[in-house]
Image (cartoon, rainbow, N blue to C red):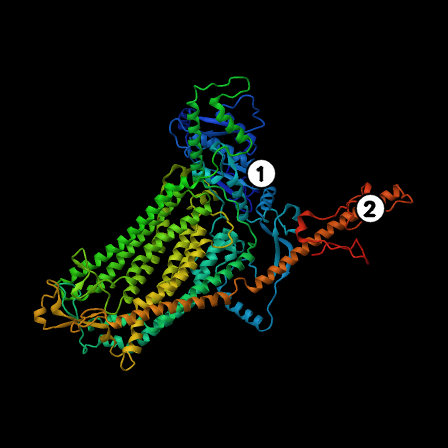
């Protein structure tokens, strides 16, 4: 296929014979220009293209005169490629936009023919060149395989886009940071020396006491900036971001006015687009010559650096602010887990130290008390003694002790402290990273949104076309210059496009999204039902297995029923949670696509909310059941609640449900973290990489390329694409729920979270540095919607912990017994107080033990507050139950209000903005104004001197007449006087000298009547 004129503009150079440059593999073939971005497309054979081209000509199209928004060359190329330009129109002055009105063969618009893709690429790259970018292609013409298009942004383009994007750059002016004095300075020095072994060895790390002022880039103020080299003034991440901004807003006419590289990738025109990494991550040569990627790999992405601080500034420089904020947040969260872990270990140690002196545990283990308990199942189970549950009671005290209440209050305040500390850290980073005052970047519509909108426009156009065909019987004007009724709608569309007015609907309405909303709601309800069904299925498993094991003739099997059932049920829960987690992630993505969000920000927020809601229910539903529902509806002996009329509802262990909640929480938390980290994040990527390496090794193309070393763009394309931070945040948010929501039942949760996060930071760092393509550096002021989720979970944790302490643990029943019902004021007799009596003769037929006649037992005990069988109100709720219930509800209210009040005090006592940041911000603002005022004064003096010389020259050539006065050259007279300025009365308007770009920093001061020296005065602040 012959090359189009657009293609002739693009230089075709060889990639194999690139000369050596300072950054080998990162430059064009000339060895001077950097490769700022890479576009990858799959080259296909031309035979299939020709066959498809003959079929695609029959598509219905209309050509629309461009209003000037599209390049004329591209438009003329489009006309040449498609044909059918309207007569009487100058192709050289206007471009043509082709709008698909529906394919004759039913071909989908999102998958154009191969020859269409070639034309689109040629036009798109020609538009990039017209925007100022420079492009280089591979020399060899491949019949198939991947081809790479390198993009370079020259200095004028970088300056133009940096000014447009308001990128802040350092100026030549610097100032000294305020140093502490006295005792504070001494402590800072000591702390700095103690932290020295934990600091990463990052070259040029800013530990100095000076800071350069920064200001939004402007091409008019180049002399103010600290430009040592045009090639390094903008770092690689900034260059990649600038090129991406051009790529995402470049219009491609042949895809029906879709905008940006993202749309072209979605349509299959390009396979990928990404900025390059800074060479290989392995250090070759002297360590002093390491690139940023090598420094990050050695000082951040290695597991041996787990004890070091993260080089957050270098992470931000290399990956951008959005990723930098994620790792900064993860670092703050991990650091604050250290005090929480220490307190949790102390609470657990207190339980270990007091287990031998705990009176309720001693009473349960005392065989002399001989509490005969009612059977755990109907028929097959026998009576049993409470002393056999001694181990469970002692283990329960490790987590259910008075220190647990203190720990729950502490963790609720810890969550508030964590959020407040992160706000301060986030503001400090925003100031040091020059993010203060930035505006949100303009977002273009997503490809799917544009596709749906285009289809809607086409449907409406087809309706109009059909409607006009039905009016053939109506009289039509055929005069010269007139338009027939058949083409009237087409003329309106053409004129509207020519005038720059949208011809059809500009956006999708709620009616267009209504089917998606309906599917969303119904699918989420179905997923909730699926989660509850999984939990209910595990409950049925526990009940049936307990009954089957109880009927076993083996006494050892009978004695281990509860341990076996609990452990296996939790493992089943864990497997179900992991499977549903992956399913829910894919379902949340699918449901969000159905909503058709307009921008990537809206898409990300909707996806996060759905994924969090589904995964939250999936991870915590089994824990909620054990904490608040298990054993609450089991009934009593003689009147149990049955499932399917055969299986009795399960009850809590003799030591309470808190120990089962602890087991459930610990296994799910640890299993989820270990499996996800080792299998999902390490094993699966390595397996994919191995499969990809095997495929590449067996390909003929790989053998040809082995003759020369692969270029950096080949290596980067082999890496996995970056798919966002949502999975990383989601994993940590779920873990934060384990740490905060049910921490009253498992004080060691912060410790295990800390150990996991120490590995998680290095694991994520290694993934970003070595296994993922370099993402575009995206600016972000905060972590977005994740902060709101964290704040909501922190408040929700207060309520959950209050109910866990009140209703799941025995803390409140022990207090009520000790201060209301104990005769001695101690805990002696507590176990007997919590057990009710049941007459074995009241068992229903078929539910009594088989050896009841031989056992010589008249009454058995069960855990509940009910009246004894000899009472007139036998088996009814006793007054002790209502006392305990009232105390539990009172504790919930007291705990919640106390913690909320303390949280408000903590939030009020910790200012969001550090005092040092406020002072530095004011100082920088003042210094920046002084810089601009000094520059304005210099400009003013320069203009004044020029006019003084001009006036002197005029006096020497044309002497003044007796009645003529020389105008004062000063603040209000900086231009040559006009005809009205000759008189001395000051009449007429006077020109004022001021640099327009600095007018926002100045205000005028009226002239003083005496001691006026116009040449020395300047505009004041």
- Check disc 2: other Cα within 10 Å, few if <14, some if 14-19, many if 20+: few
Residue 172 image point, x, y percent: 65, 54
Q: In front here: 256 or 113?
A: 256
Residue 374: which numbered mark, if any?
none
Residue at point 30%, 67% (across, down) = 807
Residue with the most extreme right position: 962
- Check disc 1: other Cα within 10 Å, few if <14, some if 14-19, many if 20+: some
In the image, residue 500 above or below residue 194: above
Residue 116 image point, x, y percent: 45, 30
Name the residue that disc number 1 marks: 132
Residue at point 56%, 55% (across, down) = 436
Residue at point 79%, 46% (across, down) = 946
Image quadrant holding the C terminus, namely: bottom right
Residue 955 image point, x, y percent: 87, 44
Q: In front here: 488 or 168?
A: 488
Residue 320, can we see it? yes
Residue at point 50%, 27% (across, down) = 63
Q: Look at the numbered disc 1 and give the secondary structure of its residue.
A: loop
Give the mark toward the camera: 1 or 2.
2
Residue with the most extreme front position: 872
Q: In front here: 934 or 125?
A: 934
Name the residue that disc number 2 marks: 949
- In the picture provided, is 960 more to the left or to the right than 24? right
Residue 986 image point, x, y percent: 81, 48
Residue with the most extreme bottom position: 824
Q: Earlier in the sequence, mark 1 or mark 2?
A: 1
Q: CA distance from mark 1 to mark 2?
A: 42 Å
- In the picture provided, is 710 more to the left or to the right than 883? right
């Amino acid at each position: 296929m012959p090359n189009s004129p657009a293609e002739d503009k693009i230089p075709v150079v060889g990639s194999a014979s690139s000369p050596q440059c300072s950054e080998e593999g990162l430059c064009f073939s000339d060895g001077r220009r950097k490769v700022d971005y890479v576009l990858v497309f799959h080259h296909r054979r031309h035979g299939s293209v020709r066959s498809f081209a003959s079929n695609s000509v029959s598509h219905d199209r209309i050509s629309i005169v461009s209003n000037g928004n599209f390049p004329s060359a591209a438009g003329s190329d489009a006309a040449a490629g498609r044909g059918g330009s309207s007569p009487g129109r100058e192709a050289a002055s206007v471009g043509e936009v082709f709008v698909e009105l529906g394919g004759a063969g039913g071909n989908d618009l999102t998958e154009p023919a191969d020859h269409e893709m070639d034309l689109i690429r040629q036009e798109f790259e020609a538009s990039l060149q017209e925007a100022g970018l420079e492009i280089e292609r591979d020399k060899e013409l491949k019949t198939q395989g991947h081809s790479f298009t390198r993009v370079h942004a020259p200095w004028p383009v970088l300056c133009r886009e940096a000014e447009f994007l308001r990128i802040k750059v350092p100026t030549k002016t610097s100032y000294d940071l305020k140093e502490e004095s006295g005792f504070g300075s001494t402590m800072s020095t000591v702390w700095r020396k103690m932290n020295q072994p934990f600091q990463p060895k990052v070259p040029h790390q800013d530990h100095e006491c000076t800071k350069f002022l920064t200001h939004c880039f402007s091409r008019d103020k180049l002399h103010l900036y600290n430009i040592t080299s045009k090639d390094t003034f903008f770092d690689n991440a900034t260059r990649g971001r600038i090129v991406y901004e051009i790529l995402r807003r470049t219009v491609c006419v042949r895809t029906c006015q879709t905008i940006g590289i993202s749309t072209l990738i979605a349509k299959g025109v390009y396979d990928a687009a990404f900025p390059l990494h800074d060479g290989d991550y392995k250090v070759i040569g002297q360590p002093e010559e390491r690139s940023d990627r090598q420094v990050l790999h050695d000082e951040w992405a290695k597991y041996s650096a787990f004890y070091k601080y993260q080089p957050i500034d270098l992470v931000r420089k290399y990956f951008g602010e959005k990723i930098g904020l994620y790792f900064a947040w993860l670092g703050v969260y991990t650091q604050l887990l250290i005090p929480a872990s220490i307190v949790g270990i102390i609470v657990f140690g207190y339980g270990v130290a007091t287990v031998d002196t705990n009176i309720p545990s001693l009473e349960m283990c005392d065989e002399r008390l001989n509490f005969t308990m009612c059977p755990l199942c109907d028929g097959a189970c026998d009576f049993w003694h409470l002393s056999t549950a001694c181990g469970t009671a002692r283990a329960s005290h490790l987590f259910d002790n008075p220190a647990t209440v203190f720990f729950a209050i502490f963790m609720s305040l810890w969550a508030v402290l964590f959020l407040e500390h992160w706000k301060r850290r986030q503001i400090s980073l925003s100031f040091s990273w020059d993010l203060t005052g930035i505006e949100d970047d303009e977002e273009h519509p997503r490809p799917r949104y544009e596709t749906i909108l285009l289809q809607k426009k086409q449907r409406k156009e087809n309706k109009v076309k059909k409607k006009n065909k039905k009016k053939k019987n109506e009289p039509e004007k055929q005069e010269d210059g007139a338009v027939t009724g058949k083409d009237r709608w087409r003329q309106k569309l053409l004129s509207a496009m020519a005038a720059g007015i949208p011809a059809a609907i500009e956006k999708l309405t709620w009616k267009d999204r209504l089917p998606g909303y309906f599917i969303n709601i119904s699918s989420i309800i179905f997923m909730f039902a699926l989660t509850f069904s999984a939990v209910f299925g595990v409950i049925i498993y526990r009940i049936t297995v307990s009954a089957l094991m109880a009927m076993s003739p083996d006494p050892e099997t009978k004695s281990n029923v509860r341990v076996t059932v609990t452990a296996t049920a939790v493992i089943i829960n864990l497997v179900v949670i992991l499977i549903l987690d992956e399913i829910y992630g894919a379902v949340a993505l699918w449901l969000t696509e159905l909503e058709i969000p307009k921008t990537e920000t809206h898409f990300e927020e909707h996806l996060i909310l759905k994924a969090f809601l589904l995964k939250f229910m999936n991870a915590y539903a089994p824990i909620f059941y054990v904490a608040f529902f298990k054993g609450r509806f089991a009934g009593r002996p003689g009147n149990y609640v049955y499932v399917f009329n055969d299986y009795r509802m399960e009850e809590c262990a003799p030591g309470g449900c808190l120990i089962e909640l602890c087991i459930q929480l610990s296994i799910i938390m640890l299993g989820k973290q270990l499996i996800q980290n080792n299998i999902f994040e390490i094993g699966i990527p390595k397996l994919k990489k191995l499969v990809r390496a095997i495929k590449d090794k067996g390909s003929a193309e790989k053998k040809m390329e082995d003759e020369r070393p692969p270029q950096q763009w080949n290596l980067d394309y082999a890496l996995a694409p970056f798919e966002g931070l949502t999975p990383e945040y989601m994993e940590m948010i779920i873990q934060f729920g384990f740490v905060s929501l049910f921490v009253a039942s498992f004080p060691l949760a912060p410790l295990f979270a800390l150990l996991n996060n120490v590995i998680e930071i290095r694991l994520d760092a290694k993934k970003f540095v070595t296994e993922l393509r370099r993402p575009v550096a995206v600016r972000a002021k905060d972590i977005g919607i994740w902060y709101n989720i964290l704040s909501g979970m922190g408040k929700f944790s207060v309520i959950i912990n209050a109910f866990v302490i009140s209703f799941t643990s025995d803390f409140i029943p022990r207090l009520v017994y000790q201060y209301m019902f104990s005769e001695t004021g101690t805990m002696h007799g507590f176990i007997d107080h919590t057990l009710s009596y049941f007459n074995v003769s009241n068992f229903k037929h078929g539910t009594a033990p088989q050896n009841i006649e031989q056992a010589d037992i008249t009454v058995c005990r069960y855990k509940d507050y009910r009246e004894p069988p000899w009472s007139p109100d036998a088996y009814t709720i006793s007054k002790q139950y209502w006392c305990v219930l009232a105390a539990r509800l009172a504790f919930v209210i007291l705990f919640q209000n106390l913690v909320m009040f303390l949280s408000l005090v903590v939030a009020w006592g910790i200012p969001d903005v550090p005092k040092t940041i406020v002072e530095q911000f004011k100082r920088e603002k003042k210094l920046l104004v002084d810089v601009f005022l000094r520059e304005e004064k210099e400009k003013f003096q320069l203009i004044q001197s020029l006019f003084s010389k001009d006036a002197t020259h005029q006096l020497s050539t044309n002497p003044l007449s007796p009645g003529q006065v020389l105008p004062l050259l000063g603040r209000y007279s900086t231009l040559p006087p006009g005809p009205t300025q000759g008189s001395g009365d000051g009449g007429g308007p006077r020109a004022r000298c001021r640099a327009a770009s600095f007018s926002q920093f100045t205000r005028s001061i009226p002239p003083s009547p005496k001691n006026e020296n116009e040449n020395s005065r300047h505009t004041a602040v």
